[in-house]
Image (cartoon, coloured by chain):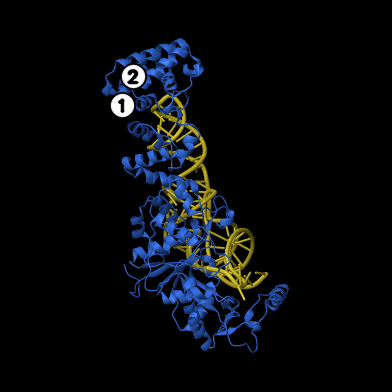
Amino acid sequence: MQNINDKKIVTRFAPSPTGFMHVGNVRAALYAWLWTKKNNGTFILRIEDTDKEREVSGSVEHIQESLKWLGLNWDEGPGIGGPSATYLQSERLDLYKKYAQKLIDGGFAYTDNTSEEQIEELRKKAEEEKRPFLFREFRPQNPPPWDGTMPLRFKVPTVKDYHWHDMVFGDLSAGPEMLDDFILIKSDGYPTYNFAHIVDDIEMGVTLVMRGQEYIASTPKYLSVYGALGVNPPEYACLPHIMADGGKKKLGKRDGAKDILEYRKEGYLPVAMINFLAFLGWNPGGDKEIFTTEELIKVFEISKIQKSGAQLNSTKLDWLNKEHMKLMSENERNTEIINRLKSNSISADERFLVKLCPVIFDHISKWGDIDALVGAGELEYYFHSPEYNAELLSWKGSDKKIAKMHLEFCLSTLESADDNLFTSTEKIKSLLFDYATEKGRGEVLWPLRVALSGKDKSPDPFTLIYILGKEETASRIQTAIKKL
RNA sequence: GGCCUCAUCGUCUAAUGGUUAGGACAACGGGUUUUCAAUCCGUUAACCGGAGUUCGACUCUCCGUGAGGUCACCA
């Protein structure tokens, strides 16, 4: 698959290290990644750390770990390097200066010696007059040469309407009021995002810029800079925002957006997470919903990205995760479940735990649900004899003597049964099922199940017997009989 | 406020002028399970409103309405 110009596709994910990554950030990375994988392109990870005040230490590592968890490997970037190394903007300051000088030389940039107070005043005035504030209307008459201590501003060359194409939103346009003399280099020497990303995208050969739709409004500014630089702009694909679960507000850190690594902690599968994220605002058009990452790469199309923002739906994520868990081999699943049990300080004979795994699997949609199961004591009776409630033991209040009689029959049947009949639920069932059917399943099976679990809700008695084993089963039934 | 964008079941979406508007999640009901879970079957549920264009509009145009974005020495 190649694009129209037959040139290699280069995309980038360029987060700023201001904290953790949430679902919205990661989806942007995923789409860019899917598109490059599909087209055999290059996926660049670039860290936009030009705002030293908002930077949160550890974020760079956190971002990388998040991407690695999901398998979104980058071809160039931190830890790997590449032809444009380094990939940290704070280490590329000379480059931005070089480009800034180009703009100055071409008459496209000037020193802004206006005081912040003055700007503030002008801005207020514009607001009072209900018209947009445009710095270009107040350009200083004789700006001093730029010495790096004052901000450097872009000088909009031609004020006009802009029309451009976006791979998601289609044809877009903006009026001249969106064009203004914005700051290229701040007074602290760092470039603004508006400038740095353009320089880097040019230098790194980026052919497609994917980013949130909040950048649509400032695209004319960028186009104008590309024009001044005499460089063709890349293609654009803006992504709609993801809305918070249950609301219509843009997902953001302040409205409870979760760190993507939280999902790892809760035991979601990376492949399910990818599947879920991919379908949040995109779908390939068929009825198929469960996709492996490889399959997604094959069918991914930018043109099918939705234009409106999708709401996060964690219930659907749970469903999807379960579907992907079902796709795992039983061995893999058991290993995960047993590890999770162990991390909850549950230890028992390995063979016993393996028997227990399928039952646990039925009740969870992610590994972390096991924590809750353990915490609520739902698994207690597998490991310790339960307390018996004599009322519970008799079927819906029927005669305790009858319950006792049935239990005694079950006990003697099981005790006299051959050991190898305890190797499957089906075999155990064959021992007792006919009797239960004859006498009334409820009357027989209810007290039996309660005798084994002590609860009114549990798996069926045959499964319980299989898990507990012959000896423990007999011992529990005996105890229950004494209670009656 | 200026500018820009978006709009199908509760949610995620399919439909590219002609369908009984389809699927999935959720919800609800039922079968199977002694019970829970799982599973199977089924039900409820949507084209934001109004004008046009057209033989025919969810699909095209315009006007409303609603929602979102953006107007920083943040990205």
Q: Position of residue A405 (x, y in %)?
A: 41, 11
Amino acid type, callout 2: Leu
**Crowdedness of circle 2 by 10 Å Cα count: few (<14), some, many (20+)?**
some
Image quadrant for the N terminus of chain A? bottom left
Which of the 4 image quadrants contains residue A295? Answer: bottom left
Residue situated in front as seen by the camera: B24 or B73? B73
Report the residue marked by disc 1: A426
Q: Which mark is residue A432?
A: 2
Residue at the (35%, 39%) spot, across then down? A334
Residue at the (34%, 24%) spot, across then down? A469
Element on which disc 2 rests: helix
Amino acid type, callout 1: Glu
Q: Position of residue A112 (x, y in %)?
A: 62, 82
Pointers 2 and 1 within a single chain: yes
Residue lying farthest top? A401
Q: Which chain is blue?
A: A
Q: Which chain is yellow?
A: B
Element on which disc 1 rests: helix
